[in-house]
Amino acid sequence: MSYGPSPERIAHLATSYLAADYRWELDGVWLRLAIGQLAPEVDTAFPDAGRFGLMTAANPGQHMRADIDNRSADRALQRRMDELGLRYRPAFVSAPNRVWRAYNWLLVAPDVDAFDTLARDFGQIGTLLWSRGTPVRLRMQASAPRACAGTAWVDWSDPIGARAAGHADTEAKSARSP
């Protein structure tokens, strides 16, 4: 039995995320993030943080929803981040041709387990998560499809699929690239 998006859909999503335009806000200025590149402005803005993440609550499981529903989910994500005592800044991601855009949040110093829990709870297949001084990485909550084997700057895990298949104790596997 298959759970979640097909391998072809996951490969398409990963390709879309890798090509997307990521921005975050600091003091009224929108700064760029790019997967596979360092984020020196983030490091400088938050010198005490060792890790950063980017996520949204929009369109869980990649099912398109009305803007009003996405905004409601965004407020719920903000409440959860506040409850967890997380620091965050406004961010967004958009397709290079601007056919889609999603509100996001840059999370400052998130715990990896808490970050992954938020991603799962809000149905997010793709997020960004990286350590200070290292290139930005795409974090996919899915198994790597054959078409994406060895894709640079992508970490793959499938805790949702493992849980759905009855393997809740299975550790998330990550394929590390450069």
Image (spheres, rainbow, N blue to C red):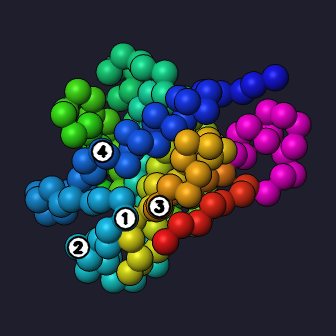
Q: Is residue 153 above or below residue 70?
A: below
Kind of residue at badge 3: Ala
Label 3, on which residue?
152
Label 2, on which residue?
41
Q: Is residue 101 above or below residue 167?
A: above
Question: Is 19 included in the stretch rendered in magenta?
Answer: no
**Residue closer to the observer: 18 or 56:** 18
Q: Nearer the viewer, mark 2 or mark 3?
A: 3
Q: Determine crowd level at label 3: few under 14, some 14-19, many 20+ residues with C-alpha closer than 10 A.
A: some
Query: Can residue 134 be seen from the camera position used here?
Result: yes
- Tell me where residue 156 appears, x and y as whole percent: 61, 53
Sooner in the amino-acid sequence: mark 2 or mark 4: 4
Q: Nearer the viewer, mark 4 or mark 3?
A: 3
Sooner in the amino-acid sequence: mark 4 or mark 1: 4
Label 4, on which residue?
20
Q: Residue at x 18, y 34 (%)?
A: 97
